[in-house]
Image (tube, rainbow, N blue to C red):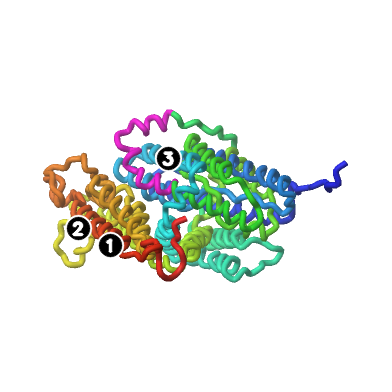
Amino acid sequence: MSDAQPFRYPIWTRGDLDGFFGLMVDNLVQVLLIVALCTTVAGIPQDFIFRRMLPGVAISLVIGNVFYGIQAHWVARRDRNAACTALPFGINTPSVIAYAFFVMGPVHRATGDYNLAWQAGLLACLVSGVIEFGGAFFAERLRRVTPRAALLGVLAAVGITFIAADFAFRIYTRPLVGLVPLMFLLLAYFAYYKFPFKVPGGFLAILFGTAIAWGTTALGWEWFGGVKMSGAALGESIKKFGWITPVFCGPEILAALQAKGLLLSFLTVSIPMGVLNLIGSLQNIESAEAGGDRFKTAPSLAVNGIGTIAAGLFGSCFPTTIYIGHPGWKALGARAGYSILNGVFFTAIFLLGLGSFIGALIPIEAGAAIVWYIGIIITAQAFQATPRAHAPAVAVSLFPALAAILVVTLGNYLDVVGGGAASAPTLASLMHSDHPLVAYLPGMLALTGANSAWIVVTLILTAVAAALIDRRYKAAAIWCGTGAVLTLLGVLHAYRLEGNVIRELFLWQGVTPALASGPATGSGAATFAYRAFPIAVGYGLATVLLIAIAVRSRRDAPPGESAGEPALGPPTAVQ
């Protein structure tokens, strides 16, 4: 007979309730964000979001949350670890921002067709899912050849601009609703303050923000920094309660694939975001292992990809991910139950038609502080999780994103000011101006590029900077040469402006007249085209310089010493 004691892993613990509230609030805010951005940026009607998109979100969440909960049971029994905590899982915030602003939004602005914008988002989500699933089997190799500063730098760029900054603007536009939740978040996550009865700070933030929004509306004070809520809309949302069957989106995806250039145009967004999601999930699995929970890498990453693919196939445009912060959930005492309950909860909410009720009950401003916090943490992690010497490289990553948020915001404002008038100012008309105050607008547009190519530009510039900090001149030359080739092809920096819409200008696309820069057509200030050949030449010359330095460095290296290794500081961050 075996002397081994019977092992019991709990199905539910008190900590699972705390973990569920935390994870549920995180995902709830992502849903509010999806509704807010899809309606305002991509022009998608709310009813379409609730009936066609959120069921896809539900399917993706239940697949991942249930798997990671069951996986925790397997690992707990394998390692006889009763404290095993399931990997936290949910909607990927940077991807929500990136796909709404840089895929769906541009398609809607260019065509006015929200259905096509949705289909473009489905394609982007599927590309990300395929990368996440396929990358499960070679993620470690990919991580070794790309500097961590470059990978995290891209996320930092998105985090500080389109997440943290954008939601800071929202908070201070509606300060009465936004600032109190912000203080709850700062108390909970910066000061680690313990609220009575262990109520999560995120839950209190949404509770008080929602209460203030409805209270000021009832008193007629919504003009005083509040948000106007609608009792009628809340009542109508309750009437929509009823089963919603998820719809397979194969025909819509096929139609999007047949739309000329739709998939190709936004690969500069979907491919980098898929890779970043893959690497980020890998790092979060490693974080869990450092905390004592050893999950197999390949199946964990593969299911993350399956969740994203399922989202795209059933109507959601937004990838899922393994969340950062596993040690935090573990410290709460959460085990496996919190993950399974989270998946079941959102499946029930969205398939029973309660998504519109949540959207009418809770204003996005009540959850703005949580999204702001996510952006801040993403940015802080980029500096904290890279070698100290690479901090300047991470700082380099912020410049293209700053250009992008200025260009996107300016274009939106000009759209509103112009109101469709033929004489209204546009980005294209400003490019024809010789006024000194707009002298550097071409540089902002070139850094941004068409199809949000700034994401790839950020990756390349940060990788070059990190390689040079480590004196790895050959690696820097390869990254710089890649930038030269992509720029020559028109993937980076090139663009054509049609009013305020920035469109692609690949090498094989023609303009009339065919100019390297200047008006794209005879319609004067309404259009503008830039081939970016000068930038390609600049990258090319820089590549030659780096190759020459790499050769000289190798030749001058003392016998037995590897050329290009840093003399001081930490070892290279290429892992």
Answer with left or right where residue 354 lies relative to residue 53: right
Nearer to us: label 1 or label 3: 1
Residue beneath disc 3: 127
Among the 4 quarters of the image, the one containing residue 442: bottom left
Outermost residue to the top: 251
Q: Secondary structure at mark 1?
A: helix
What segment carries the magenta color? Answer: 251-274
Q: Earlier in the sequence, mark 2 or mark 3?
A: 3
- Amino acid bearing label 3: Val
- Mark 3 is surrounded, within 10 Å at the Cα level, by few (under 14), some (14 to 19) or many (20 or more) other residues, namely many
In the image, what residue occupies the spot 57% across and 43% down?
61
- Mark 1 is surrounded, within 10 Å at the Cα level, by few (under 14), some (14 to 19) or many (20 or more) other residues, namely few
Give how far across and how far down residue 549 sits, in percent. Answer: 28, 62
In the image, what residue occupies the spot 51% across and 55% down?
363
- Mark 2 is surrounded, within 10 Å at the Cα level, by few (under 14), some (14 to 19) or many (20 or more) other residues, namely some
Measured in 3D between alpha carbons, the distance from the residue under mark 1 to the one under mark 3, in whole angstroms, is 42 Å
Residue beneath disc 1: 552
Q: Is residue 235 visible?
A: no
Residue 258 among magenta residues = yes
Circle on res. 430: 2
Among the 4 quarters of the image, the one containing residue 162: bottom left
- Amino acid bearing label 1: Arg
